Amino acid sequence: MDKLRVVIADDESLICMDLREALQALGHEVVGEAANGADALRLIRELRPNLAILDIRMPGLDGIQVAEAVMEERICAVMLLTAYSQADLARRAEQAGVLGYLVKPFTEADLLPAIAVARARFEEMQALREQVGSLEDALETRKLVDRAKGLLMTFQRVSEPAAFRILQTQSMNTRKSLKEVAQSVIATYERLPKRK
C-alpha cells in the first residue's frame, strides 16, 4: 500500500496518539490532528490528505457532519472511528458517504484492511465520477453538433453529411473542439431569420 497522508480527529488525546502510532507503524504520515469537528474540517480542506479518520462523537461538528462535507467536496476518503455501534449512526455514516468504519478499541491489524477498503472505494467513486462527467460532456457535445448541423442544413441548404463535414473542417482549421465549433455555429445562425 502507498504511503498515505492522513488527518486524524478524536477528542480523546490518547486515541489520537494510539492512532498516530499505528498509522506510522503502517508507513503512513499523519499530517494533521484535531480534537473537534470544525478543526478537523479546516485541516482536511487545508492539507488535502489522502485519508481522514474521524471520531463520530466530537465537540461541535460530529465526525459524520465532517465526513459529509469532505465527501461532498471530494477531498479524500473518510473512515469513522467509534465506540458506538448504534444503527442510526451507521445509517447516517452511510448516507454521508463514509467509506470505512472502525470500532474502538482497534488494533493495527484492524486498521490495515479498513484503510485499504476505504481507499479503494474512494478511487472507484472518483473514477465513476470522471466517467459520468465525460459521458455527460459527450452527450452535450452530440446535442450541440446535431443542433449546429440542423442550422447549417437550413441556412446553407446542405445535406446532413455535408453539414457535419463543414463542422469537422472548421474544427481542424481553427484547432477548436467540435463542441466549440458547434457552439459558435449555433450562436451565429440562431440570430438570423430562418430561410423559407
Image (tube, rainbow, N blue to C red):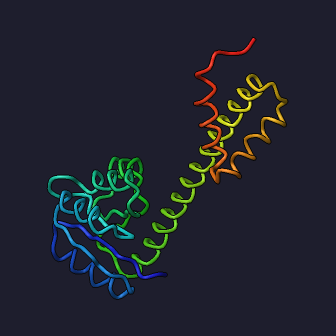
Indicate the quadrant where residue 144 lies: top right
Q: Position of residue 179 (x, y in %)?
A: 63, 43
| Residue in the picture at 82% in, 32% down | 160
Q: Quadrant of the image for the C terminus?
A: top right
Q: Position of residue 148 (x, y in %)?
A: 68, 32
Q: Position of residue 128 (x, y in %)?
A: 57, 55
Q: Nearer the viewer, residue 189 or 144?
A: 189
Q: Position of residue 184 (x, y in %)?
A: 60, 37
Q: Nearer the viewer, residue 110 or 60?
A: 60
| Residue in the picture at 75% in, 47% down | 169
Considering only vertical position in the picture, is 176 above or below 166?
below
| Residue in the picture at 70% in, 26% down | 151
Considering only vertical position in the picture, is 33 above or below 134?
below
Q: Nearer the viewer, residue 57 or 53?
A: 53
| Residue in the picture at 69% in, 48% down | 171
Q: Is residue 18 left or right of residue 159?
A: left
Q: Is residue 10 left or right of residue 23?
A: left
Q: How many marks?
A: 0
Q: Nearer the viewer, residue 84 or 98?
A: 98
